[in-house]
Amino acid sequence: MNIFHIAMKEIKSDFLDIRTLVFMLAFPIVLMLVLGTALSSTFNASITIDDMNVLYKDQSNGEFSEYLNPFIKVAEKEGIHFKKAAENANGNEDMKQNKYDGYIEINPKGIQLYLNNQNSIEGNILQGLLTSFVDKYNIASQVVNVAPEKVGMVFTNQKHESFIKETSLLPEKQPGSMDYYAIVMTTMIALYGAMSASSLINGERIRKTAIRLIVSPVKKSEIFIGKVLGNVVLNFICVLLVVFLSKLLFHVNWGDNIWMIFLVLLTEVILAVSFGLGISYITKSSAAATTIIMLVIQLSSFFGGAYFKIENPEGMMNFLTKLSPLTWENQAITKIIYANDFSAAIPALTINICVAIVFLLIAVTFLKRREGL
């Protein structure tokens, strides 16, 4: 019962602190809005391609012309403009001067394509376009022997929605900018629970109330457990409020398995509180503990992708991102939401609990060695 009363006192006193509530609630919501809006373009995977200009020279004595002209008309509708080169023109030179995206030479021996940039998207489109024309020409050469009047249909009887069509195995299964920053801001603010935890005991010493607690008819272990439990509950409530506010204000997608996400966030809060408490006992100084905790939180936020998305890190960057608690939290939550992958939560839950136990053992060890709190 003493543990319950101490935990409730801790929750009530912290809820009366307006600055704490504003920071824990307003700070992540404002960052979600600012970063989610300002960096929305970086989450847009669509590609815009300008019209392309192609120069061609027909030296086939009219052999391809009757098939090429209908094909050019179809390509014109898709923004690919063909221009016939003069007999004495140097098409390759014009293309190298960036006047055209490609140059095509047609002669009785075949067709040759020269590209301005072979690795560009435009180059790939032109290669596919020309391959399509050659395939249709081969078909037309066979159709002309059977039904000459239907040759034109080979090139004109088709519908082109686009020369590029993007298809994903799981369409609409990737977080947008607001969804991404809602996840990372929530996990980041959960990590800030270490700040309040660092003052759980140090605060009592500074206020000179630690001696009163020790002489009261309450066990030292009950005081410790009650204060830790109250701080965990308080921080977890703040995290839940951030989740619900993001869903209400920004319509963030938290998936259909919200209970599993809450479990991951709860273990992260326990990790943060244990870390803050352990550091406060190790340093024995409020200022030193605050400095260390803020440094760890900021580095974890930076390398965990809280401020900008980190994709496919390599070398040292890859090593540092894996050290950040936000990395494994964000990966677990994202997979739960967008892939219904519950197994992704196991590494995050395991690491959170194991690290929390280590810092709690450190705090308990220092507590037993001290006469007071």
Image (spheres, rainbow, N blue to C red):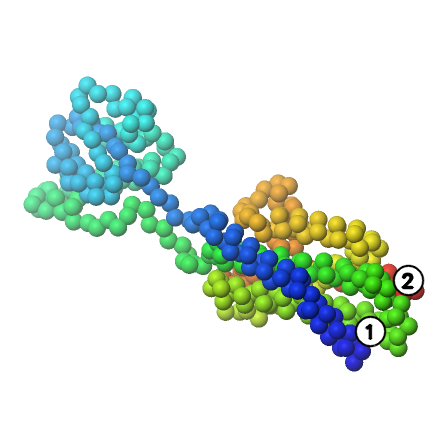
Relative to 373, is 312 on the left or the right?
left
User: Which residue: 33% across, 50% down?
Assistant: 165
Residue 286 x %, y %: 80, 55
Residue 67 x %, y %: 15, 38
Type of amino acid under label 1: Glu
User: Circle 2 — which element?
Assistant: helix
346 above or below 63? below
Frontmost residue, 91 versus 304: 304
Label placed on residue 369? 2
Which residue is the extreme one toward the bottom?
1
Question: In which quadrant will I find the C terminus?
Answer: bottom right
Label placed on residue 16? none
Relative to 269, is 248 on the left or the right?
left
Alpha-carbon span between mark 1 and mark 2: 16 Å
Which residue is the extreme one toward the right?
371
Tell me the residue that label 1 is attached to.
222
User: Circle 1 — which element?
Assistant: helix
Q: Residue 105 occupies which quadrant of the picture?
A: top left
Type of amino acid under label 2: Arg
